[in-house]
Amino acid sequence: MSGHSEEEVKKQVTLYIRVFFALMCLTVITVAISYLHMPILWAVAVALFIACIKGSLVAAFFMHLSTEKKIILAILLLAAIFFFVLLSFPSWHLA
Amino acid sequence: MSAEIHYISEPHPVSGITNSKLGVWLFLASEVMLFGGLFSAYIMLRTGVPDWPRGHELLNVPLATLNTIILITSSVTMVLAWASLELKNIFKFRLYMTITILLSFCFLVVKSFEYAHKFEMHHFPSTSNFYAIYFVLTGLHGLHVIGGIIVNTYLLLPGSKMWKTNPEQFTGRVEAAGLYWHFVDLVWIFLFPALYLL
């Protein structure tokens, strides 16, 4: 990300501030929804959905993944595949 | 033979990115596996029993919410510290980096209050599976916060001398430290609802 013009960086700074407010709003929403005491399956689905949005915002903008080279996405995809394989191992054992 | 490491500031012709950035991302991928393994353990422990306590019944949600706000804010100040270097403003870099480090300490102080309360109530990792996974996950995350403080303090104090000799490489270092710090934030974004709210 280095070597950007001053104007580009200033635009990014504005974007970071917007992402910050979005993350704050989503945090408030997550906590507020938890006080509704929904059935566990709904609570997990909603909490995970919001956490995924927040995580994507951090990864895409703060970690610059939205503009990064494909090689980094490939590394992360590989890690994600291994993660899901790891997660599914106990299920295979149970089956 | 030269011992110099190449492609630190300019992209490698094959990968298209600097070697340092590639290294940090590979490290973060291994971190995904570390936390992923523990998250898997949490899911298996939780789904393996008929009854599992809801996090908000045992843990302090307001304190954890405060810590979430602190960590997200520190993530923003970290990225602003890097942006300040891109704008060639070392003064603002120092300001934002100092705020980031102070917020990191705030996170640990809040966490220590939380732990102290648990120990007062005689709740230890050996008390139950819930507390075992709670202490392991939050403890490991806390160790990562400490690691971030050490790296960021180095970059703020002795490491910042490099700004005068090689500003591009120094900016790259701050970006790499930032990637790590945002990852620590990202882990907490999932830990918070998983442990405290569900």
Image (cartoon, coloured by chain):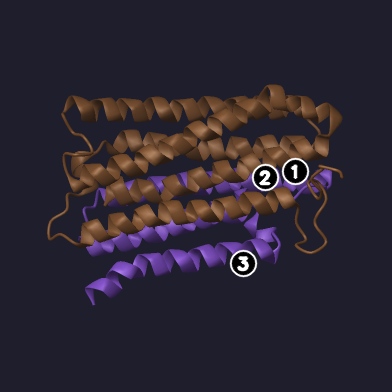
Residue B100 appears in the picture as rendered: no
User: Given this view, does label 1 or label 3 mark the residue nearer the observer?
Assistant: 3
Lower sequence index among marks 2 and 3: 2
**Label 2: how many residues lie within 10 Å, few (<14), some (14-19) or many (20+)?**
few
Task: From the top left corner, tell me how far across and down residue B145 is, in percent.
Answer: 48, 35
Q: Chain B appears in which tint?
A: brown
**Label 1: how many residues lie within 10 Å, few (<14), some (14-19) or many (20+)?**
some
Spatial distance from mark 1 to mark 3, Cα to Cα?
Answer: 29 Å
The chain that hosts pointer 3 is A
Q: Is residue A35 left or right of residue B20?
A: left
Lower sequence index among marks 1 and 3: 1
Q: Residue at (74%, 42%) from the top-left corner?
A: B172
| Amino acid found under the numbered disc labelled 2 | Thr
State whether residue B38 is above or below residue B65: below
User: SS of the residue at dot 3?
Assistant: helix
| Residue on which disc 1 sits | A10
Q: Residue at (57%, 44%) from the top-left corner?
A: B180
Spatial distance from mark 2 to mark 3, Cα to Cα?
Answer: 29 Å
| Residue on which disc 3 sits | A74
Task: From the top left corner, tell me how far across and down residue B150 is, in percent.
Answer: 56, 29
Task: From the top left corner, tell me how far across and down residue B30 is, in percent.
Answer: 52, 54
State whether residue A59 is above or below residue B177: below
User: SS of the residue at dot 1?
Assistant: helix
Chain in purple in the render: A
Q: Are marks 1 and 3 on the same chain?
A: yes
